[in-house]
Amino acid sequence: MKVCVIKTSSMGDVIHTLPALTDAQKAIPNLSIDWVVEENFAEIPRWHSAVNRVIPIALRRWRKAPFSIQTRNEWKNYRTLLQAENYDAVIDAQGLIKSALFATRFAQGVKHGYDRQSIREPLASFFYDKKYAISYQQHAVERIRQLFAQSLGYELPQVQGDYGIARHFLHQTSEQNYVVFIHSTTRADKHWEELEWQKLIEKITALSDYEIRLPWGNEQEKARAERLAQVHSNVIVLPKLTLTELAKQLANAKAVVSVDTGLAHLTAALDKPNITLYGATDPKLIGCYGKNQHYLSASSMENIKSDQVFSMLNLLIK
């Protein structure tokens, strides 16, 4: 069976789709999936064994220069690639007008998606041939698992979803015990105070020889990591890494502490012990899903203190 999956962004949403692939692969032995995804996240689907082909889309970049020759040529090539196959099913797991307009309607095959009451942007449901009522009152991972099960006609497994990618990264082990601190996120209200990160570093380095590794994605994040690294010699600022390289770092860490960001969901997908810090966001419906996931939440990030995080982290790394 050939299936086209539309889930373009963001990182957390793309990762949330992986357990549905694992379900479908177990239920349909000859399953082959092509996945339309934003170019920045194109590495992620390649980690899952059910994926045959990744079809990158570059809407974020194209909209900056929609009429340039480069954009027109890339759009033409994208459509050619997307329309090269006749699929047994096309599943729009994004549920947005942009995913319906720029991906789902061009794919060849019966189109499946959420119905008007189950979708973020109801107009998108007009592009689907088959529509399903799926409750919002459950985690996003479970919603997508239900969408796949109904679209492809198999019974949803009554067990926790399996991302199916952890084994891809556990080929090497590090002699050095280390933890990773994911300190950066896109929204200001999701940041944890730098002073609290510093206090947490002091507490860990005082009681263990663990390295603390700090990833970063832009110059502002790098500057923060470098400031935190001044607290102790055991704090390492990682070089600029691809998603695959970063996944290897996370997969071999003893534990991770993270703010609410896509890399927290990647950590969950790798089954790593992870403490995620939440302010205004309710983690019950869109928080980190999977094994070994823990969270601390408060009305705002400034109300989460290093003592709380250290107490939880100390139990994970003992």
Image (cartoon, rainbow, N blue to C red):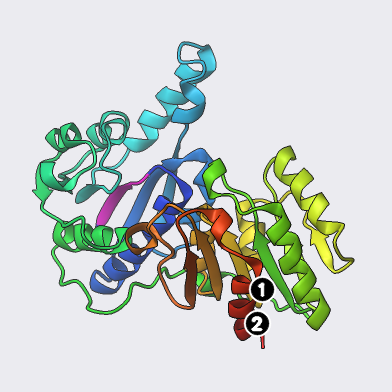
Q: Helix, strand or loop at disc 1?
A: loop
- The front one of 306 and 137 is 306
Q: Helix, strand or loop at disc 2?
A: helix
Residue at the image position 65 percent from the left and 82 percent from the top:
314
Residue at the image position 16 percent from the left and 31 percent from the top:
123
Image coordinates for residue 79, horizontal then vertical, percent? 36, 29
The answer to whether residue 209 is seen in the rendering is no
- The front one of 178 and 65 is 178
> Does the segment drawn in magenta span residue 6?
yes
On screen, residue 240 above or below 291: above
Q: Real-space Cα distance between discs 1 and 2? A: 14 Å
Q: Residue 253 carries which label?
A: 1
User: Magenta region, mostly helix, strand or loop?
Assistant: strand
Quadrant including the C terminus: bottom right
On screen, residue 240 above or below 47: above
Q: Give the range drawn in magenta.
A: 2-7
Residue at the image position 48 percent from the left and 29 percent from the top:
60
Marked residue nearer the N-terminal end (1 or 2): 1
Residue assigned mark 2: 314
> Does the segment drawn in magenta span residue 273?
no
In the shown orientation, is residue 230 left or right of residue 143? right
- Confirm or deny contact between disc 1 and disc 2 (CB under 8 A): no
Residue type of the residue flagged with mark 1: Ala
